[in-house]
Amino acid sequence: MKTRALLSAVILLGALVGCGTTISETSTTPQIAQYRIVRIAVLPFSVVQPALGRQFGSVAPAVPVTAGDKLADAFYLKLNVREGLAVVPPSLVREAMPSITASVAGRHVLRDLGERLDVAAVLEGTVDMYQERKGSAMGLERAEDAAAVRFSVRLISVKDNQILWSGDYAERQRPLTEDIAGFLQRGVRFVTVDELADSAVDNVLRGFPLGHLPQRTQGE
């Protein structure tokens, strides 16, 4: 049943990205305060390639192998500026456990990783869409040529493998006539996939429960 529910969720997210709808969801466990987390590590994100040859009625684009590192680095950089939270970057995680991948998070290696890095939780994620814009910033021939991203991220306790927070994001940039707020936020243009991903991480982290932005940043 769990596998079927997960598959249904992935199909739904895929369909929504295909038709241009933005999905941004986060969830925090009510017990998170009991864990008293002040230090976390960001694991390298795993890249999941499309399982089928076709997707949303067209050939499914391959996900660049660099997409996982780009998203992991973006989460690290944005979390690292938060006060009250210490963050270990993905590069140090790779040095601590060179063979680790995001798919093993929440398994038997987490406790050992927590001890090596002196962290109470890890942030892991997967990305299964990272499509570059086809066309210029001023215009595209087709709606499906816009940049698109889809990823999931989880904060997991190394003590008991409890998922403390999770986020899901899926978006294909829409034209100005369909998404005025999004265009104004990004500079009234069609963005690259890296720019879209950076904006997506900001969006998801609005619901992140640990640390807080410096007062100066909040004012800006």
Image (cartoon, rainbow, N blue to C red):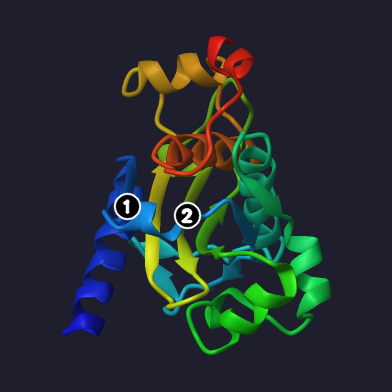
Q: Secondary structure at mark 2?
A: loop
Q: Would residue 181 be found to the left or right of residue 60 on screen? A: left
Which residue is labeled 2 in the image? 36
Residue 172, percent across and down? 43, 42
The front one of 111 and 125 is 111
- In the rendered image of this protein, does residue 140 appear above or below residue 172? above
Along the line of sight, the residue nearer the viewer: 140 or 131: 131
Q: Is residue 108 above or below residue 170?
A: below
Asked whether the viewer can see residue 176, the reply is no
Q: Earlier in the sequence, mark 2 or mark 1?
A: 1
Quadrant for residue 90, please give it. Answer: bottom right
Quadrant housing the N terminus: bottom left
Q: Amino acid at mark 2?
A: Arg
Decide if residue 199 is in sight here. Answer: yes
Task: Return the residue at label 1.
Answer: 28
Q: Residue at x 31, y 47 (%)?
A: 25
**Please, what is the three-letter code of the amino acid marked with disc 1?**
Thr
| Circle 2 or circle 1, nearest the eye | 2
